[in-house]
Image (cartoon, rainbow, N blue to C red):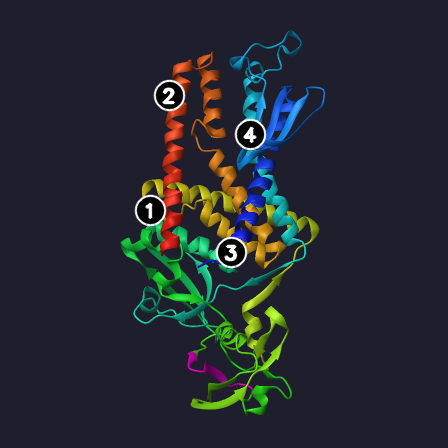
Amino acid sequence: MLSMGSVLINLLSFLVAISVLVAVHEYGHYIVGRWAGMKVLRFSIGFGRPIWSRRSGRDDTEYCIAAIPLGGYVRFLDSREGPVAPEDEGRAFNHRPIPWRIAVLLAGPFFNFLFAILAYWVLFMPGVMVLKPAIGEVVPDSYADRAGLRFGDRIVEVGGEPVDDWESALVAILDSMVATGKVPLELEHEGGGHRRAVLDVGGDASRLTEPGVLFDGLGFSIWQPPAAVGSLTAGAPAEGAGIRTGDRITAVDGEPTPTWNALLAAVRDRPGETVDVEYVRRGYASTVTLTLDEEGSGENRRGIIGIGLPETSADYYFLRTYSLTGSLNAAVAKTWTSTLFTVRMLGRMVTGDVSFRNISGPINIAQFAGESAERGLSYFLGFLAIISISLGVLNLLPIPVLDGGQIVYQLAEAVKGSPLTDRAQIIGQQIGIFALLLLMSFAFYNDIARILG
C-alpha cells in the first residue's frame, strides 16, 4: 500500500512530466505554425477552464494554463470555425498550402523526439555506467536452465547481433522471441570460453511479454554481484567475527543473501542489532554472531557489516564515455532505436504477438514518474525521454483525432483536390474517438489489474 507521501510525489511528478512534455509538443505546433504564417489564437497547457492566462504579441495570442492537466492544444485561425477578418486573409490554417499544414502537424511529434535527443545528450555527456548483459541466478527446470544458461554467463550476441549492455540485449531478446519463439545466444562463461545456447519458448512468447514477466518466465535474473567478501573494514563487525576475504555470505538471521544487493537489504534495516551470519569458506558452511555497526542518522540510519565487493565484480560493469559530439550521436541513435522498438511493439500488439498488458495508463505512468523522481534528476530525465518518444509515436498514429490522422486528411485533400466533406470528417472523428476510448479502456484496466495484483 502506497503511503500518502508516495501518492503525493507520484501525482506531482506525473503533473510535472505531462506539463513539460505537452508544452514541448504544443510548442512544436505553435512555432512552426508561426513560421508558416498562420495566426495563433490560443496556446493552452491543459483543457477546460483557464486558471491563468495572458495575451501578447501582434496577433493578441492567448497563452493559458487550464484546469485539466492531461494535454493541451494550439488553436489556429480557421475559416471552417468562423469568418476570417480581411486583414487576416490567407493566415487561416486551412488557407495555407498543404505542405505547410503537414509540417505544422508533424512538428509536435518531432519536438517530442527532439526533446528525447536533448535529454539523452545531457545524460550521456558525463558518461554512463553500464551493466554488461550477464546471467544471474537460474531457476531449475526453466527455459534458461534447459538452454544451459549458468550464473555469470555473459551474453555476447543475440540472434547473431553483438550486444554489450543489458538494454540492447533485452531489446534483441524480445525481438527474436516474438518473431520466432526462439532466442539464439552466444555466451561467454566466467573462464573466458564461448558457447552457443537457444532459449526456446515456443508459443509462450506473448505471455512472456507481459510487464514484469520476462525474466521470471524465462527463469533467470540479471546478474548481480554475489555476496562475497572482497575486502574487510578494519575494526568492523565482519572482521571482528572472524569473517575473511573470499568468504561468501549466504544468509543473515535466516534471510538468504544470494547477491550483494540482497545482503545490503538484509543488514540495512538492522542498525545496532545482533544477527546470525551464515557463510561458506572453501566449501564449508559456518555461522557467526555479530552486532551490526550503523551509519547515518534519522531516516537515513542504516546497518553495515563492514565488507567490500570483490574486484572481479568490476568485470561486469564499465563506464561508457563519449566526446561532446559522440554523446550527441549516441543520443540520436538511442532515440531512433527506441522509436523503432516502440513502433514494432505497437504493431505486434495489434497482431497479438505482444501482450496488451504493456499499455500503461495514467496511474502506472504516475508511479513510474514518482519512482524516477525519488531516485534523482537523471532518472527522471531518462523517464521523460522515454515518455516523450512514446507520445511522439502515439500522435503519429493514423487516428483522426491525433496528428497522424490529421495528416491523412491533408494527404486526402491533396489527392482529391478539395477538402473532405464534413460528413466524412465527422465519421473519421467518431472512429478516432472510439479508438482512443478503446485504448484508454485497456490502459485503465491494466492499471487497475496491476494495483490489485
Instruction: Identify residue for label 1.
Output: 353
Instruction: Identify residue for label 3.
Output: 4
Q: Report the span colored magenta.
A: 245-255
Q: Residues within 10 Å of mark 4 (few under 14, many from 20)?
A: few
On the question of residue 348 being in view, the answer is no
Q: Which mark is residue 427?
A: 2
* Mark before the other along the chain sequence, 3 or 2: 3
Residue 57 image offset from top left, x and y in percent: 71, 23
Q: Residues within 10 Å of mark 2 (few under 14, many from 20)?
A: few
Nearer-the-camera pick, 407 or 357? 357
Q: CA distance from mark 2 to mark 1?
A: 30 Å
Residue 306 image offset from top left, x and y in percent: 59, 82
Q: Is residue 386 left or right of residue 215?
A: right
Q: CA distance from mark 2 to mark 4?
A: 28 Å
In front: mark 2 or mark 1?
2
Q: Residues within 10 Å of mark 3 (few under 14, many from 20)?
A: few
* Mark before the other along the chain sequence, 4 or 1: 4
Residue at 46%, 90% in the rendered image: 287
Q: Residues within 10 Å of mark 1 (few under 14, many from 20)?
A: many
- Per the image, label 2 sits on a secondary structure element best described as helix
Q: Is residue 48 left or right of residue 328?
A: left
Instruction: Identify residue for label 4.
Output: 49
Q: Is 76 contained in the magenta span?
A: no
Q: Is residue 198 left or right of residue 242?
A: left
Q: CA distance from mark 1 to mark 3?
A: 38 Å
